[in-house]
Image (cartoon, helix red, strand yellow):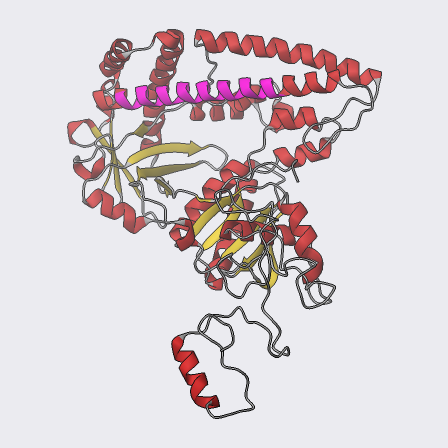
Amino acid sequence: MGGLRKLETPFVAPGPCGVAVRDRLKLLTSQDERVLRAVGAHQGALASRDLKTRCANGLEHGADTWAARKRDLTKESSSRIAGAITKATHDRWALARRCQAAHIRQLDAGIRTLRHRLSLPLGEKGTKRAAGGYRSKGEWFRKSRRLATLEARHAAAVADWQAGRVRVVRGGKRLLNTRHHLTDAGLTEDRWRERWEAERWFIAADGESGKRFGNETIRVTPDGEVSIKLPAPLAHLANTRHGRYTLTARIAFAHRGAEWADRITANRAVAYRIHLDTERGRWYLTASWQRPAVQTIPLAAACARGVVGVDTNADHFAAYRLDRHGNPVGDPHRFGYDLSGTAGHRDAQIRHALTRLINWAKCAGVGAIGIEDLDFTGEKTREKHGGRKRFRQLISGMPTGKLKARLVSMAAEQGLAIVAVDPAYTSLWGAQHWQKPLTTPRRKMSRHDAAGIAIGRRALGHPVRRRTAPPPHDRSDRAGHRTAQAEPDNRRREGTRLPTTDRPPGRPSPSRKRKRGTSASNTVRDAPSTQQWSRLTYVHWLGTVEGDATGPEAPTADGGSR
């Protein structure tokens, strides 16, 4: 038991802090598209130039350089457009900086793993916590070369980090590399060029509270009219006053439309972005706004009506409903999905599976969904499981971060809380304690279904192990405590609670040395009783047996005989 790692305390995941909805701009005229393309190309060029300047500044960026960049952009656009471009530039640079730090951490983990495995003798077996030695001299040599490669990459990444150099591609690195593989991608050069230019356009505006309908640059009225404040060089394209262009298309957000309408009616900030889907040839408008931070409910309140424990797998969610005492209710449920194909297909599959899961949890009447707080590290997994290619592909294909964020957002709309638990030993202990007892001729239990029970019990604060069988010797407790679920202050608990390894941190763990006598059997006469008699009970008993010479001796208030 000393080798088990300490379990983290379950916690209620915070709710979403932002909202984004999208609608299609239908029935655009040729003039509308011409204006949108011109605005996107002009502001996209400004954004590219500003990003180049910001990357050149590196760590020497300050308020003065920011103000100088904004003044240069204002001359060719407007003050609000310049502010939106510089803010987007800073977000891109900060994201690249965070990705650079994560890359350095992954290289560190890979180097440590390689050094450890190279230091072991050939063929030495590993453990669950650390991999063993390599199988042959050839594999050892190849991994030693890979160690040198990772060390060189690490040195270069650290040098870039210290110098403040980041590498950012407006339009996406993947689309840029597709230019060299047009045949494999099924694209012509003209089609690729169209996608590349559309991805580098910039038609976006940040919201402003107190301004008309929450945005001055891209304004959307409650009846769906969309107008754009044109930059100074394109002011001659305006078809309304004050240098604005009004589109013929109308929008109506089917999802969260009432919430959006309330915000713009109260002149609260709403950010907008217009983009072109070149594959479909459709224009879309995306509206986004922030929500005030809402304090999460306590864990006990979230689990008061029971939980649904969900085990995340490569092709399905395994869910099991548990009541507030940790008892499984009903049969397991599985919600399948397919993570092959394009990113859009995978995202749609995840959304569909989560929708079915949330609807079932809502119908079951629970108040929370328990899920593992998974966080896979690709580089560390590769160095530890280098020979298990299918397993590495399985791990890297599970969208853990995006799945958790989407689940939190979707569950919050249905009034469900998300409880994140430590994923350690859930599959192992779930299969050990729950798979066989719940398997019946009509109920097939898999290892993943049992893991869902373990996750749900951990979210409720209960140990994973189920109620143990009665002692094998006799009715006394010489073989050990009969249940692992009763609380220490429960007067009906039987005997001494054995220490458990799956108790949440902060909860008291009983000692093996503590002893507690068991209550006498009802069939034993004249045996001393440990039950405390109240005065009312004693008086009632005395009235029923008074004058009975053959009756038992009346007990005193402390449980003895009179």
Q: Which residues are magenta?
A: 83-109
Nearer to us in this view, 280 or 532 = 532
Nearer to us in this view, 216 or 319 = 319
Task: Please state the horizontal and vertical placement of residue 171, each as a whole percent of the image.
Answer: 46, 22
Determine if residue 447 is in view: no
The quadrant where residue 28 appears: top left
Determine if residue 67 is in view: yes
Task: Please state the horizontal and vertical placement of residue 447, each as a whole percent of the image.
Answer: 68, 51
Task: Please state the horizontal and vertical placement of residue 451, each as a whole percent of the image.
Answer: 62, 50
Question: How many numbered marks are there?
Answer: 0
Nearer to us in this view, 408 or 287 = 408
Task: Please state the horizontal and vertical placement of residue 184, each as a whole percent of the image.
Answer: 65, 26
- The residue at the point 51 percent across, 61 percent down is 323
The quadrant where residue 147 appears: top right
Q: Is residue 491 above or below residue 192?
A: below
Q: Is residue 494 above or below residue 59?
A: below
- The residue at the point 44 percent across, 85 percent down is 542
Image quadrant in which the N terminus is located: top right
